Image: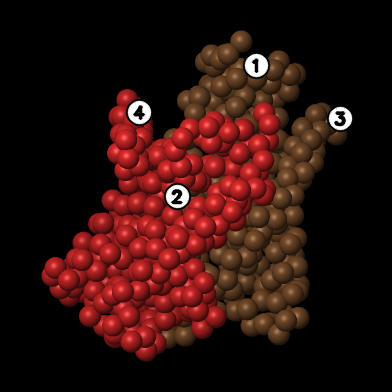
Amino acid sequence: MQALRPYLAAFRARFQLMLQYRAAALAGFATQCWWGVLRIMIFAAFYGVHAAAAPISLADAITYVWLGQALLALLPWVADPEIGQAVRSGGIGYDRLRPLDAYSYWYARTLGWMLARAAPRAALMALAAGLVLPLAGLGAWAWQPPPSLAAALLFVPAFALMTALGAAIVMLANIIVAASLNERGVNAVLTPLLIVFSGTLLPLDFFPDALRPFLHVQPFAGLVDIPFRIYFADLAGGAALQGLALQAGWTVVLIGLGRLAIDRTMRRLEMQGG
Amino acid sequence: MNALALYGRYAMTSLRAQAQYPAATLMLTAGHCAATAIEILGVFALFDRFGPVGGWTFGEAALFYALVNITFSLADLLTRGFEVFGTDFVRTGAFDRVLLRPRAAALQLAGHEVRLSRLGRFVQAFAVLVLASHLVPIDWDAAAVATALWAVAGGVALFGGILILQATLAFWTVESLEIAHVLTYGGVQAAQYPLNIYAAWFRRLLTFGVPLACVTYYPALAILNRPDPLGAPGWLLPIAPVAGFAFLGLSLLAWRAGMARYASTGS
C-alpha cells in the first residue's frame, strides 16, 4: 500500500483539479445532449423503415447512444495535453527526478484526468436521459437501466476495463508525444481511429457483416462496443466473459507495449528549454 | 484602399505565411480530410443495412452530405478570426488594438487567418459529390450548377452568421464558448441527412430558427428535380438560400450591439 501512495496522490491531485472546470463540463453536457438527440432521431428514422435489419433493438440503440454520450470524455481522444507542455517546456525534467516509476506515474495522472472529465458529465447525463426523460413522458427515448442484475454486475468489470484500456491507449499517445515533441500528429491519427473502431460512430454490428470478424477482435472494440453491449445484455453469459477477456487481454498487451516504449524514449530524451 | 482590396491583402498575407511551411500545411489538410471523411462511412453503413429511408437512397443522401460539407468547409476556412475571438482577442485585450485601426473590426477579424487545412473537408466532400453524381442521375446543366453555387454562397453566409454570433457572445462571457459547435458541427451532422426523416419540431427549427434546410435541403431538391415530400412549393426551393444572407445580416446587427458594450479586459 505504501508503494502506491505517490501514484494515488498524483491521481487525486489531477482529478480534483479537473473537477474545477464547471463551465466546461456544463457546455460539454449541453453539446452532448444535442448530439444524443440528433443521433437518436437518425436511428429512429432508419428503424422506422426496416427495423428487422438492425442487429439490436431501437431501445437498446437509444441506451447505447446515451451511454456513449455520458462516457464520451472517458475515451482516449487525444494525448494528455499536459505531457506535450511538459516535454516542450522542459518540465518533464522534474518528472524524471522523482523516485517513481515513470509509466505508473503518468498512467495515474492520465487516469485522473480522464475520470474527472467524465464524472460530472456522466452524472448530469444519467439525470437528464435516465430520469428527466421518463418523467417528462418520453420514456421511449430514455436511457434504460441494465435489464438484469447479471448484466449490471458484469458491467462493473467491463467499465473498469474500458477505463484501464482507454488510459493505456492515451499512454501510448503520450509516449509518442514525448518522443516527437508535438501532439498534433498523433491526435490527428488517434481520433478518427477511435471514432470508427470503438463503435462511437455506429455500434460495430451496424457495419457490413463481412467486417465483423475483424471489428470484434481489435483493441478499440473494448472501449465502447463490448462494454455497452454487456450493459444491455446483448453480450451475456459466455459471450460477455469473452468480451471481458478481450478487454483485459488488450489492456495487458498495450500496457506492456507502453512500458517497453517509455523505457526507450526516456533513455533518449533530450531536455528542451532551460 | 477599399475594403475588398484590403481583405484580399489580409488573405494573401495569411496564405503566404502558410506557404512557408508547405509540408505541415499539406499534412494538416490531409489529416482534416481523413478526420471529416469518416462521417460518410456512417451514412453508408446505415443505408447499406436498412435500405432507402424517407424515399431517399444512399446516392441522394450523398448529395445532401456533399453540399453541406462543401459549404461548411468554405465557411470554416474564412471565419477563423471569429472562432478564436473570445480566447485570442477579448481575453488578451488584443481587440483594443483592432479597434484603434480606422477599419471595420468585423473586416479585420474576417481577414485574421485563412486556414488552408480546412480544405481537407472540401476535398472529401467534393469526392462524395462526384460519387453521388455517378450513383443517381443528376443533370448538371447550367441551372443546376448555378443553384448549387447559390446554395453554397447562402450556406457560407449562414455558417458565417453563426460564427459571428458565437464571437458576439464573447463580449459578455469573455471566453469563447464552444456551445456554438452545436449549431456548426451539429448542424453539419444534421444536414447531411435529408430533412424529412426528422421529427417535426426539429424540421421547423432547421427551417425557421437556424435556416440550415434553406441552404442545403431545399436547393438540393431543386438540383435533383424532386418535389418536396413535405409539400414546400416548387418556386421556393431554388430561392430558399436567401435565408442564409438574412441570418448573416441579423448576426451583424447583434455584433454591432455587442461592440457598443465592449469593455476592455485591461491587460
Measured as percent of width and height from the top left, residue B18 is found at 34, 31
Disc 2 vs disc 1: Cβ atoms closer than 8 Å?
Answer: no
The kind of residue tagged 3 is Gln
Label 2 secondary element: helix
The kind of residue tagged 2 is Pro
Q: Which residue position holds label 1?
A: A93
The kind of residue tagged 4 is Ala
The answer to whether A50 appears left or right of A169 in the picture is left
Q: Residues within 10 Å of mark 3 (few under 14, many from 20)?
A: few
Do tags 1 and 3 sit on the same chain?
yes
Q: Label for residue B17? A: 4
Give the number of the mark in front: 4 or 1: 4
The answer to whether B75 appears left or right of B250 in the picture is left
The chain that appears brown in the image is A
Measured as percent of width and height from the top left, residue A100 is found at 73, 23
The residue lying at 54 percent from left, 52 percent from top is B255
Image quadrant holding the C terminus of chain B, namely: top right
The kind of residue tagged 1 is Gly
Q: Which residue position holds label 2?
A: A192
Label 4 secondary element: helix
Measured as percent of width and height from the top left, residue B156 is found at 37, 57
> In the orientation shown, which residue stands out farthest toward the top?
A274
> What's the distance in space between the residues labelled 2 and 1, CA to CA?
32 Å
Q: Label for residue A2? A: 3
Label 3 secondary element: helix
The residue lying at 54 percent from left, 80 percent from top is B201
The residue lying at 63 percent from left, 44 percent from top is B262
Q: Residues within 10 Å of mark 4 (few under 14, many from 20)?
A: few
Give the number of the mark in front: 3 or 2: 2
**Chain at numbered mark 3:** A
Identify the colour of chain B in the image: red
